[in-house]
Image (spheres, grey):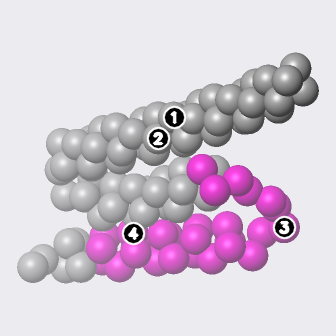
Amino acid sequence: MTMLEVLTFAFGSTVTILVLAVGHWFPWDLTRIQAYIYGTAAILLGFTIWRLPLGDWLTPLGLAIIAALGGVAVLLAYGTDKLVQRIRIAEMWEAVDDAREE
């Protein structure tokens, strides 16, 4: 391992740690999904800081694409959960209306 590899790894790791620490104690109220995005972006930033100076742009790009696709999967799962919840609530109201008509 070269000195540049060690230094860029240390710097990237330090940036990730500091960004996550600031995000943890910063006085804001993030939703769960916003917190996922913030944390993932902080990790991707540190990884990119490590790899780009070494001439490796493909690995950070691939990792960012995979993380984005994972984020889309999470958003779709949350959307599905909300849709199912709304359908169940509508069914409950329909049952209440049916009971009133009897």
Q: Is residue 22 visible?
A: yes
Query: How would you rate the neighbour count of disc 1 (Cα within 10 Å): few for under 14, some for 14-19, many for 20 or more?
Result: few
Q: Position of residue 78 (x, y in %)?
A: 54, 42
Mark 2 element type: helix
Q: Main secondary structure of the magenta part?
A: helix
Residue wearing tag 2? 77
Closest to the observer, 43 or 53: 43
Instruction: Check the image and report above or below for 80 versus 34.
Output: above
For this rendering, which residue is in front, 98 or 52?
98
**Disc marking residue 80:** 1
Disc marking residue 4 = none
Spatial distance from mark 2 to mark 1, Cα to Cα? 5 Å
Labels 4 and 1: the sequence-earlier one: 4
Q: Nearer the viewer, mark 3 or mark 1?
A: 1
Residue 68 visible in the displayed image: no
Give the amino acid at mark 1: Thr
- Residue 90 x %, y %: 72, 27
Q: Earlier in the sequence, mark 4 or mark 3?
A: 4
